[in-house]
Image (cartoon, rainbow, N blue to C red):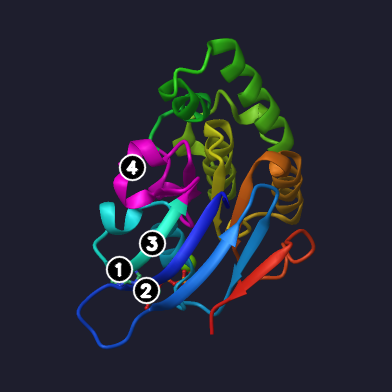
Amino acid sequence: MPLLSVQNIFLKYAQTDEWLIKDMNFDAEKNDILLIKGPNGCGKTSLLSLLCGIIPKAIKGIIEGQILIDDIDISELTLPELSPLISMVFQEPEMQLSFPQVEQELAFGPENLKIPANEISKKIEDVSELLGIPELLKSDIAALSYGQKKLVAIASIFTLSPEIILLDEPADGLSEQSIQNVIKCVLHYKNDKLFIITSTTHVFDDIENRIITFS
Ligand SMILES: Nc1ncnc2c1ncn2[C@@H]1O[C@H](COP(=O)(O)OP(=O)(O)OP(=O)(O)O)[C@@H](O)[C@H]1O
Ligand SMILES: [Mg+2]
């Protein structure tokens, strides 16, 4: 049984003749790093939103087909039930961040899952170290640069630590050093997670083991 199984998925946003995503099928396992490529507007973000249930649970869409995680059809789960299984780092960090301070943002996911406080502290320390942001932990999020917000948004999904992590254009707006830190973090956790990464650039080409290209 694959960790993730995408079966005959179709998506469109409104009653039009054309499907945006048309009969997509793939399986993926822990330790896989899938790269989703394709030009602007081809549907990469839409695919990730489908995989984590945001479409159709929060954003309307017309869909067909099935997405299974650990053999469970995700349509049977609520968004809070899905988030420890599969979560997405949004392309725009502002869409994701909801706390005044960085450390609060990083603690929210694991606190919600009732993880013991000492484990949460360790997780925050490890993730912020890997991403090169330990000095930001006490900062106000509103005072951060775009790139720093982006790193905090990425860090908050790593501290939540779902089985499947979706990263939507994670390199967008980051310095070369920060991109290398994101890659380091992905490789550090890769053995017990599935990563699905969209990118219009080539920065993740060396770490993927499979590519899905939209035509
Ligand atoms: N909520 C929505 N309602 C209607 N149409 C949408 C919605 N979100 C996206 N679209 C349209 O669906 C198409 C695919 O958008 P999507 O954001 O998935 O592409 P993308 O490959 O992620 O693009 P980019 O490379 O710019 O991030 C675009 O034509 C977009 O305008
Ligand atoms: Mg996108």
Is disc 2 surrounded by few (<14), some (14 to 19) or many (20+) residues within 10 Å? many
- Mark 4: secondary structure: helix
CB contact under 8 Å: marks 2 and 1? yes
Q: Residue visible at 26% across and 66% down?
A: 61
Ligand 1 is within 8 Å of the C-beta of the residue at disc 1: no
Sequence-wise first label, 4 or 1: 1
The mark lying in front, picked from 4 and 1, is: 1
Q: Residue visible at 54% across and 12% down?
A: 117
Residue 31 position within the rendered picture, expressed as x and y whole percent measured from the top left:
70, 48
- Rendering quarter of residue 142: top left
The amino acid type found where label 2 is placed reads Phe
Residue 159 position within the rendered picture, expressed as x and y whole percent measured from the top left:
57, 31
Q: Distance between the residues labelled 3 and 1?
A: 9 Å
Magenta span: 69-97
| Residue 63, label in figure | 1
Name the outermost residue toward the bottom: 17
- Mark 3: secondary structure: strand
The amino acid type found where label 4 is placed reads Leu
The answer to which of 204 and 69 lies nearer the viewer is 69
- Asked if 137 appears above or below 184 in the picture, the reply is above
Residue receiving disc 3? 66
- Which quarter of the rendering shows the C terminus? bottom right
| Residue 79, label in figure | 4
Residue receiving disc 2? 10
Is disc 1 surrounded by few (<14), some (14 to 19) or many (20+) residues within 10 Å? some
- Asked if 212 appears above or below 76 in the picture, the reply is below
The mark lying in front, picked from 2 and 3, is: 3
The answer to which of 143 and 155 lies nearer the viewer is 155
The amino acid type found where label 3 is placed reads Gln
Residue 70 magenta-drawn? yes
CB contact under 8 Å: marks 2 and 3? no
Sequence-wise first label, 2 or 1: 2
